[in-house]
């Protein structure tokens, strides 16, 4: 006998829209998980969605023989801008298969290693900016990390210099992207017919999408006009051939994936770096250990590619940051469309679910499952994420990069970029909160970042 899946009662037509704070939906979902337990149901945007928040349930759902990604909710709305790009393609879509096979080598270890110098170039711009600021100037942490990660992906992936550190305002791409993601999220939670009555919102949405496309079109045109031999993602997309079918990416698929990389390739990493610095300032002994490791391994000399694999404590800090604040806080699965299970169940047979049923993994909760992480699950303790304890975690207890075939293709890029940046910053500066009583707030689009988080940077004594 199966049991009904709990959840708050909804209203006719609008469903559970009032149960979700549109500004901070993750907070609302966490609260609902506290009330209804590790699985609950909401009716949003015209469909029922399940939310799971324990390692045991996520482990079941990560079995790719039974479940696969679903492009639902906000992700489905993002298709309005990037159609079947890698991130938003439905399972089995042909363009995803071609792009995946063509682009996997471009994200392989050697390719990412080759991007080190360009990542270093951009990270050094950040160091110079903060050094010139001096200790009194207030640093907009997420703003500057967003400049860093956007410039880094644009330069490494398509040889495009956004020069964000040299402008007061963010590149127009960032504002268009933020608007596009925010509105995609909002559309996912309101009944579709309402969109027809929101003319100015729709116009803004369309013009944001047009700007994103324009940036991609210009970058492709520039490369076609001035071909280069660079081993970057753009050349992989323009010249690469699918080893299975011999096909190349269509022009449309190239544009969709360029925008996808610019979006997926910077927001999440910028959020991770920002949360990490918040945690280091909040936990001084951890901060000291991290800085000590940089001093011992790198010393005063240049940070090099060889250092990247020699900073295990920094790596543990990054993992622990993504555990507590997974910057892509939800990913969505469904029973495989070709399943022969009848009935389809979840929870070891306890709950019956429908074909096509979206199951959202609420990572902020799964990552604090007390059965896995213990009573101090809420605390920032990187020691639990050092290689050995990390490798002994139960399966699928830490999933900030998503699952299986549809997991993050850019993970090695994000890791190298972040390790390098953290090493450079800790080597060169001492940091302190602007407001020591700062309480962490969250700014959410599709990803999460700290809200109104400011700090100060003082050049360290050993810097001449
Ligand atoms: C997919 C997280 C950095 C490109 C994903 C997914 C997650 C994720 C959770 C799966 C989404 C889903 O199942 O719907 C992160 C985090 C990052 C990061 C936490 C940094 C800390 C990057 C970077 C790039 C990138 C730097 C590009 C350079 C992508 C792409 C996909 C993806 C293209 C779709 C892959 C596919 O389905 O084929 N990422 N990501 N990500 N990510 Fe990342």
Image (cartoon, helix red, strand yellow):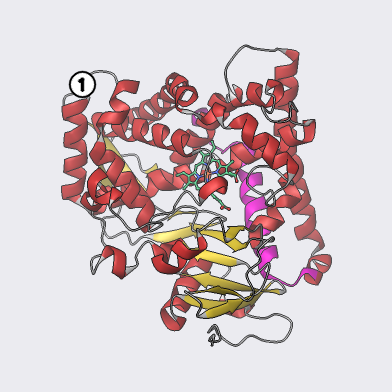
**Viewer-nearest residue: 403 or 448:** 403
Instruction: Give the percent coordinates (x, y) of residue 193.
Output: 81, 71
Q: Is residue 315 magenta?
A: no
Q: How many marks?
A: 1
* Residue in view at x 75 percent, y 28 percent: 247
Q: Position of residue 72 (x, y in %)?
A: 66, 61
Q: Is residue 111 left or right of residue 95?
A: left
The response on whether ligand 1 sits within 8 Å of label 1 is no
Q: Quadrant of residue 462?
A: top left
Direction from residue 409 to residue 71 in the image, left or right: right
| Residue drawn at the location 41% of the way across and 61% of the way down | 441
Magenta stretch prevailing secondary structure: helix
Please say whether residue 163 is visible from this viewpoint: no
* Residue 401 visible from this viewpoint: yes
Quadrant of the snapshot with the N terminus: bottom right
Which quarter of the picture shows residue 429? Answer: top left
On-image quarter of the C terminus: top left
Check disc 1: other Cα within 10 Å, few if <14, some if 14-19, many if 20+.
few
Give yes or no for residue 191 being in the magenta stretch: yes
Identify the residue under disc 1.
300
Give the vertical position of 458 relative to 160 (above or below). below
- Identified at 46% across, 42% down, the residue is 269
| Residue appearing at x 52%, y 53% in the figure | 447
Give coordinates of residue 423: x percent, y percent: 29, 31
Q: Quadrant of residue 359?
A: bottom right
Q: Name the element at disc 1.
A: loop
* Camera-nearest residue between 255 and 409: 409
Magenta residues? 164-192
Q: Is residue 305 above or below residue 100?
A: above
How far across and how far down the image is residue 112, in percent?
Answer: 47, 26
């Amino acid at each position: 006998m199966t049991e009904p899946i709990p959840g708050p009662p909804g209203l006719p037509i609008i469903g559970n829209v009032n149960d979700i704070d549109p500004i901070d939906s993750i907070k609302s979902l966490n609260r609902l998980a506290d009330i209804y337990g590790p699985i609950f149901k909401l009716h949003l945007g015209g469909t029922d969605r399940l939310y799971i928040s324990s390692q045991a349930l996520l482990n079941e759902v990560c079995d790719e023989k039974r479940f696969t990604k679903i492009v639902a909710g906000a992700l489905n709305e993002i298709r309005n801008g990037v159609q079947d790009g890698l991130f938003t393609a439905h399972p089995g879509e042909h363009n995803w298969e071609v792009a995946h096979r063509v682009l996997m080598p471009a994200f392989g270890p050697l390719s990412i290693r080759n991007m080190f110098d360009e990542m270093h170039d951009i990270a050094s711009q950040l160091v110079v900016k903060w050094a010139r600021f001096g200790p009194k100037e207030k640093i907009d942490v997420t703003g500057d990390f967003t400049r860093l990660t956007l410039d880094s992906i644009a330069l490494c992936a398509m040889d495009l210099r956004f020069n964000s550190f040299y402008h007061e305002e963010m590149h127009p791409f960032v504002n268009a992207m933020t608007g596009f993601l925010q509105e995609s999220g909002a559309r996912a939670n309101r009944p579709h017919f309402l969109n027809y009555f929101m003319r100015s919102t729709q116009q803004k949405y369309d013009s944001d999408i047009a700007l994103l496309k324009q940036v991609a079109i210009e970058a492709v045109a520039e490369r076609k006009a001035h071909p280069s031999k660079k081993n970057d993602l753009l050349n992989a997309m323009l010249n690469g051939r699918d080893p299975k079918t011999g096909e190349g990416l269509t022009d449309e698929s190239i544009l969709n994936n360029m925008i996808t990389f610019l979006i997926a390739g910077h927001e999440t990493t910028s959020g991770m770096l920002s949360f990490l610095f918040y945690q280091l300032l909040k936990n001084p002994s951890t901060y000291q250990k991290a800085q000590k490791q940089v001093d011992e391994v790198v010393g005063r000399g240049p940070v090099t590619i060889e250092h990247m694999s020699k900073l295990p404590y920094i790596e543990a800090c990054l993992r622990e940051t993504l555990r507590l604040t997974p910057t892509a806080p939800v990913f969505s699965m469904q029973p495989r469309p070709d399943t022969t299970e009848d009935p389809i169940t979840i929870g070891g047979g306890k709950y019956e679910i429908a074909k096509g049923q979206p199951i959202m993994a609420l990572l902020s909760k799964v990552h604090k499952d007390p059965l896995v992480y213990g009573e101090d699950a809420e605390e920032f303790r990187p020691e639990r994420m050092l290689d050995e304890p990390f490798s002994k975690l139960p399966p699928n207890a830490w999933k900030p990069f998503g699952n299986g075939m549809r997991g993050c293709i850019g993970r090695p890029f994000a890791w190298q970029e972040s390790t390098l940046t953290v090493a450079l910053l800790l080597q060169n500066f001492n940091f302190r909160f602007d407001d020591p009583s700062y309480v962490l707030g969250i700014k959410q689009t599709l990803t999460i970042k700290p809200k109104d988080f400011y700090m100060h940077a003082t050049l360290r004594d050993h810097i001449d």
